[in-house]
Image (spheres, grey):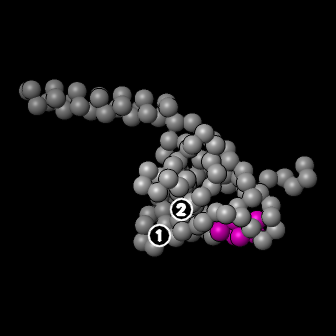
Amino acid sequence: MMFGKLCVAGALSLILTSSASEALAAPAEYEDVPSDWFIQDYIGSPAGVTLWRANLPNGDCVQSQTGSTYLAFPSTVTDQEVNRFWSSVLSAKATGTKVGIYYDNQTCIISSFFIPNIGG
């Protein structure tokens, strides 16, 4: 009987902890010309692609070992989405235009990306 109470208490604690950390997370938006972005493809990893050296606001998403900023895709990202991201970033690098990214400032996961209105 005691084991059952501990399991319920542990599960409740996990739910409350998860809810509290989710409440602290905030969607963030970032736009920049990607001239110094470094995109790395980790072959075989679930997300595969990580964006390094973005100048994110408020010290978001700093990797503790290197001090570099980073953003990653969720494990649910499709090949087509990654290909569109690569294409958008390479086009923006070549033309000097901005790329915009929405991301979670706690998990550093990209939720969407876009090319901002030019001249608008």
- Which SS type dominates the magenta stretch? helix
Q: Secondary structure at mark 1?
A: loop
Question: Furthest-right residue in view?
Answer: 119
Please say if 17 is above or below 40: above
94 on left or right of 2: right
Q: Position of residue 66 (x, y in %)?
A: 46, 57
The amino acid pointed to by label 2 is Thr
Q: Position of residue 83 (x, y in %)?
A: 63, 70
| Mark positioned earlier in the residue sequence (1 or 2) | 1
Quadrant placement of the N terminus: top left
The amino acid pointed to by label 1 is Tyr
Q: Report the residue at 71% width, 70% height from top.
A: 90
Any part of residue 82 in sight: no
Please say if 89 is above or below 114: below
Q: Report the residue at 50% width, 31% height from top.
A: 24
Mark 2, residues whose alpha carbon is within 10 Å: few (<14), some, or many (≥20)? some
Q: Quadrant of residue 86?
A: bottom right
Q: Position of residue 50 (x, y in %)?
A: 53, 62
Q: Report the residue at 80% width, 64% height from top.
A: 96
Any part of residue 62 in sight: yes
Q: How far is the residue under mark 1 from the one under mark 2?
A: 8 Å
> How many numbered circles does the render carry?
2
Label number found at residue 107 = none
Residue wearing tag 2: 50
Q: Report the residue at 49% width, 30% height from top.
A: 23
Q: Which residues are magenta?
A: 85-92
Q: Secondary structure at mark 2?
A: strand
Mark 1, residues whose alpha carbon is within 10 Å: few (<14), some, or many (≥20)? few
Residue wearing tag 1: 42
Do the residues under discs 1 and 2 have CB atoms within 8 angstroms? Answer: yes
